């Protein structure tokens, strides 16, 4: 069995939205090119079977997306994408024919978290059209997310959730009242074959400027996941939006050397003891939520 269940690859840190729940990034904005992607694939291939086009940025913006799918398929890797859903309509044909594409995670909370110029109906029509087409004409899994539920610590932008659920019920051909069973104790459900809905509380991204911290934390970072930023920097998870825990650069150093570096081993061993040794990890709202 390969070490990581998933490796996040940030094929771009550029986004077409400015969600109020997103921490943004202070790093230079880039699009990953074909040469860099190929080198990253070569480096991670021995470590995982699944890659995720996700960290910061909107992956569907990258003009090399179709090429990346082809390269991933040739490498025997399955691809998962996390998207805000705004570009699903225009990218639909390419996504449906990409043999490497396993799952598309759609963050519907992005609409209310922005001052979008398009209407909610226009946005959701593009999303539901993709979901229906994917279900009927491919084996792609569609995972619809509303990760904007109020938590004890923060208020989510969720006043439109009822309208969103009504639209999904109508346009995905679901039974009336199907969502009545959803609750904090039962936040997920299969809507139909290969189509899922998941509700979750809004969480606070890790931030070095935060005052509160928690050293007693367990995380799967470097245990079954890791991330690679657009410039090749290896980070322990997908929530290190600014590369505050750089473990090395996969374009400059062998992956095995990076994973066995002093900093990487200290982080891994710390979590084995349920201890966060990195300041950023100590201030992670996601780890606190779980």
Image: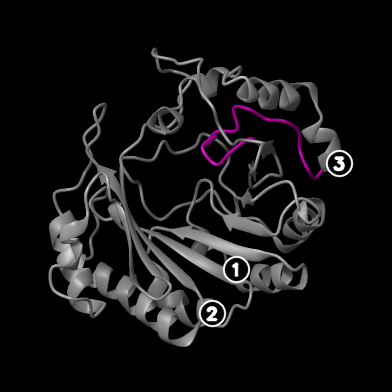
Q: Nearer the viewer, mark 3 or mark 1?
A: 3
Q: Percent from the top left, x then y, of residue 261?
A: 80, 27
Q: Look at the image and tell me whether residue 119 can be seen.
A: no
Q: Which residues are magenta?
A: 236-254
> Is residue 251 shown in magenta?
yes
Q: Which mark is residue 254?
A: 3
Q: Percent from the top left, x then y, of residue 198?
A: 34, 55
- Ranked by sequence position, the earlier of labels 3 and 1 is 1
> Is residue 11 shown in magenta?
no
Q: Which mark is residue 242?
A: none
Residue 274 located left or right of residue 141:
right
Q: Is residue 182 above or below residue 66?
A: above
Given residues 2 and 123, the one toward you in this image is 2
Q: Which mark is residue 65?
A: 1
The residue at 47%/70% (across/down) is 141
Q: What kind of element bears circle 2?
A: helix
């Amino acid at each position: 069995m390969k070490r990581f269940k998933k490796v996040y690859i940030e094929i771009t840190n550029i986004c077409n939205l400015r969600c109020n729940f997103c921490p943004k990034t202070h790093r230079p904005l880039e699009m990953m090119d074909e040469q860099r992607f190929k080198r990253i694939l070569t480096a991670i291939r021995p470590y995982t079977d699944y890659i995720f086009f996700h960290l910061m940025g909107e992956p569907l913006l990258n003009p090399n997306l179709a090429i990346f799918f082809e390269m991933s398929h040739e490498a025997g890797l399955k691809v998962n994408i996390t998207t805000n859903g705004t570009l699903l309509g225009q990218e639909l044909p390419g996504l449906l024919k990409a043999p490497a594409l396993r799952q598309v995670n759609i963050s519907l909370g992005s609409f209310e978290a922005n001052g979008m110029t398009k209407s909610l109906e226009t946005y959701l029509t593009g999303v539901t059209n993709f979901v229906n087409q994917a279900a009927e004409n491919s084996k792609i899994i569609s995972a619809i997310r509303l990760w904007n539920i109020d938590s004890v610590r923060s208020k989510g932008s969720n006043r439109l959730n009822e309208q969103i659920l009504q639209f999904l019920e109508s346009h995905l051909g679901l039974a009336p009242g199907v969502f009545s069973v959803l609750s904090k104790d039962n936040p997920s459900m299969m809507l139909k074959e290969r189509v899922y809905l998941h509700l979750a509380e809004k969480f606070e991204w890790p931030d070095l400027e935060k005052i509160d911290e928690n050293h007693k934390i367990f995380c799967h970072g470097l245990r079954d996941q890791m991330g690679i930023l657009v410039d090749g920097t290896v980070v322990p998870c997908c929530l290190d939006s600014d590369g505050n825990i750089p473990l090395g650069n996969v374009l400059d150093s062998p992956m095995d050397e990076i994973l066995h570096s002093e900093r990487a081993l200290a982080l891994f061993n710390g979590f084995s003891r349920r201890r966060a040794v990195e300041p950023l990890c100590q201030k992670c709202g996601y780890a606190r939520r779980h």
